[in-house]
Amino acid sequence: MPTSPPDPARFVADFFTSLTDSTVRGDAPDSVMARHYTPDVVQVSDGLPLDHDRLLAHLRPVRKNVVDYRFEVHEAVAEGHRIAARLTIHARTRKGGPTSTEVHLFGEFTEDGRMRRAHQLTRALPAAEASERAK
């Protein structure tokens, strides 16, 4: 991502889809991390800082539990390597059924499209609101 992507919403959707596809299909976790995150990544999710090792550990439950997913990017803006986006993650898990999570993301990406830093605020959507957004 040498400059602002021409379509920041597409960039965000493609990033998370690629990350999740790689994880769910069983690619080696270290390989998934190397393709999507810098070694010094820090992602703060709802106030909880996740470094490279914690993000790597997060891939295991995603691989075991997620059976279907899609990312609905409602809006995104970019300036150089920084992106702000509002999106909804729709997922279905093996045991828990469908879920939808609203995400507000502020991220910094490298020239090759890997995440270096991010802050995310999330909230689980109530079932009725999730169904409406899924349409």
Image (spheres, rainbow, N blue to C red):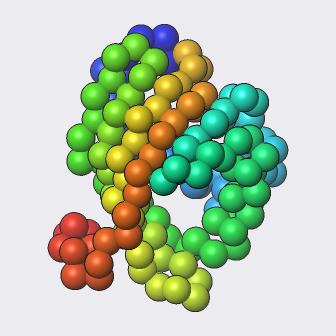
Identified at 46% across, 32% down, the residue is: 107
Does 16 sit above or below residue 122?
Answer: above
The answer to whether one can see residue 42 in this image is yes
Work out whether residue 18 can be spotted.
no
Q: In this view, does 30 lie to the left or right of 55?
A: right
Tell me the quarter of the picture where residue 36 sits.
top right
Quadrant position of the C terminus in the picture: bottom left
Residue 56, percent from left and from top: 75, 50
Task: Residue 92: give x, y in percent of width and height.
Answer: 48, 76
Asked if residue 128 is positioned above or below residue 135 in the image, the reply reads below
- Of residues 90 and 53, the one drawn nearer to the viewer in this rendering: 53
Residue at left 32%, top 51%? 87
- Looking at the picture, does residue 6 appear above or below residue 62? above
**101 displayed left or right of 43:** left
Pick the residue in front: 78 or 48. Answer: 48
In the image, what residue occupies the spot 74% across and 35% down? 34
Report the number of discs: 0
Residue drawn at 33 percent across, 39 percent down: 85
Is 46 on the left-hand or right-hand side of 84?
A: right
The image position of residue 90, as x and y in percent, is: 39, 66
Residue nearer the viewer, 98 or 48: 48
Q: Residue furthest front?
A: 47
User: Does 126 sit above or below residue 102?
Assistant: below
